[in-house]
């Protein structure tokens, strides 16, 4: 299928739920699920699939019909269909680059809360107006700016969970050895990893908006040879409505080592991984992990794990889905 989220790979951008006012009766309104843990609680929001994209149904006001929001950690800012942004809204400058193009424009911008089942789950999210390509059947995009300052867990394709702890206790279910530094490169969650048999550290972005993972072959030239098998043809729709075409490459196996201190890390191995060969905006690419990225970990990688994005502590947590948090 089409990795439509790659179109939203934005650069040059740079839920809050009050525990004191939280009404537990609301937790049983609609589809929200509430799970208490020692030191806090998870707010569970089920993801719906729209054209194979992870979507949350959220309302902009209590009691209003919900809209479809693509969850896209590969985009730092959030977007809302132009029809839902009042004409008299303030204008702001937007600069973005994406596969095959770039945009610089002045757009309407608003800040708005978002509700699910009568509960305010995201507060004061800033949205830029946008006319989405007809191929993308969503009303908005929820980017990383909605999650900054909070702790979320991704269990793709099923649900997104928000950890709330009055005592600031760490989210359960992620042992210390499974926590890795998170860099917010252009506002996007980035991890440093090694791809054996190579020894060069690389930066990769975790992007829920990309169906396939992405690796730029030209940027990694000069490192160890990267072996692959050729796969199917694929197309990538970009933010401007155009598309890129390429033949998928299959890495067998894909065993990245996520790095902590120097070269200390933990390996996560899949028997194979489909990657789109290139398409990352040139201004984001660099073989030096301190200056840019070489790849994107898309949903086809992330769906194999439970992923924690702890923006409070700048940590990424990764555990297998078969891992039972209660036994950790």
Image (cartoon, helix red, strand yellow):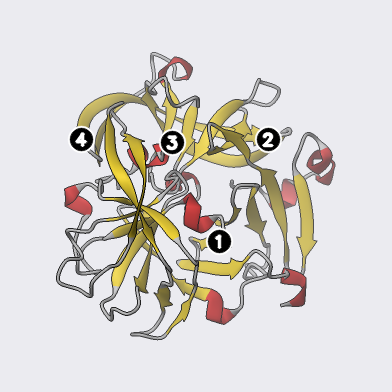
Q: Residue at x 65, y 48 (%)?
A: 159
Foreground label between 1 and 2: 1
Q: Is residue 189 visible?
A: no
Q: Is residue 124 visible?
A: yes
User: Which residue is disc 1 drawn over?
Assistant: 307
Provide the secondary structure element on which disc 1 rests: strand
Q: Which residue occupies the foreground of this view, 298 or 317?
A: 298
Task: Report, in whole angstroms, how far the alpha carbon at label 3 lies from the one at label 2.
Answer: 18 Å
The answer to whether marks 1 and 4 mark residues whose Cβ atoms lie closer than 8 Å is no
Quick check: 117 left or right of 193? right
Q: Position of residue 301 (x, y in %)?
A: 48, 57
Provide the secondary structure element on which disc 4 rests: strand
Of callouts 1 and 3, which one flags the residue occurring earlier in the amino acid sequence?
A: 3
Of callouts 1 and 4, which one flags the residue occurring earlier in the amino acid sequence?
A: 4
Quick check: 9 left or right of 220? right
Please, is residue 52 above or below residue 231 in the view? above
Task: Report, in whole angstroms, how far the alpha carbon at label 1 lies from the one at label 2.
Answer: 22 Å
Task: Report, in whole angstroms, how far the alpha carbon at label 1 lies from the one at label 3.
Answer: 24 Å
Label 2 CA crowd tier, 10 Å (few <14, some 14–19, many 20+) = many
Residue 96 tag number: none
User: Which residue is disc 3 drawn over?
Assistant: 126
Of callouts 4 and 3, which one flags the residue occurring earlier in the amino acid sequence?
A: 4
Task: Report, in whole angstroms, how far the alpha carbon at label 4 lies from the one at label 2.
Answer: 34 Å
Task: Report, in whole angstroms, how far the alpha carbon at label 1 lies from the one at label 4.
Answer: 30 Å
Quarter of the view holding residue 116: top right
Of callouts 4 and 2, which one flags the residue occurring earlier in the amino acid sequence?
A: 4
Q: Position of residue 78 (x, y in %)?
A: 42, 37
Foreground label between 3 and 2: 2
Foreground label between 1 and 3: 1
User: Which residue is disc 2 drawn over?
Assistant: 116
Q: Which residue occupies the foreground of this view, 65 or 297?
A: 297
User: Which residue is disc 4 drawn over?
Assistant: 102
């Amino acid at each position: 299928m089409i990795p439509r989220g790659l179109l939203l790979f934005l650069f040059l951008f740079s839920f809050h739920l009050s525990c004191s006012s939280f009404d537990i009766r609301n937790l049983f309104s609609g589809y929200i699920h509430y799970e208490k843990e020692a030191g806090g609680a998870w707010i569970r929001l089920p993801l719906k699939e729209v054209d194979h994209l992870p979507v949350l149904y959220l309302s902009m006001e209590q009691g209003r019909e919900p809209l479809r929001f693509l969850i896209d950690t590969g985009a730092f800012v959030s977007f809302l269909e132009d029809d839902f942004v009042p004409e008299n809204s303030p204008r702001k400058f937007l600069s973005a680059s994406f596969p095959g193009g770039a945009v610089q424009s002045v757009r309407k911008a608003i800040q708005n809360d978002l509700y699910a089942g009568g509960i305010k789950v995201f507060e004061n999210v800033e949205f830029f107006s946008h006319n989405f390509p007809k191929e993308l059947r969503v009303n908005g995009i929820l980017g990383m700016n909605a999650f900054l300052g909070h702790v979320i867990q991704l269990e793709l394709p099923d649900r997104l969970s928000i950890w709330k702890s009055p005592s600031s206790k760490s989210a359960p279910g992620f042992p210390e050895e499974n926590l890795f530094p998170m860099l917010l490169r252009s506002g996007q969650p980035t991890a440093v990893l090694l791809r054996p048999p190579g020894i060069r550290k690389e930066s990769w972005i975790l992007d829920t908006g990309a169906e396939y993972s992405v690796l730029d072959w030209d940027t990694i030239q000069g490192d160890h040879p990267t072996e692959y098998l050729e796969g199917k043809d694929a197309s990538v729709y970009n933010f401007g409505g155009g598309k890129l075409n390429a033949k998928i490459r299959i890495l067998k196996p894909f065993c990245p080592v996520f790095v902590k201190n120097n070269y200390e890390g933990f390996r996560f191995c899949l028997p194979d991984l489909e990657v789109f060969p290139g398409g990352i905006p040139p201004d984001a690419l660099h073989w030096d992990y301190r200056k840019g990225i070489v790849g994107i970990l898309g949903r086809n990688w992330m769906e194999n794990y439970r992923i924690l994005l702890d923006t409070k502590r700048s940590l990424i947590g990764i555990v297998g889905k078969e891992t039972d948090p209660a036994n950790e």
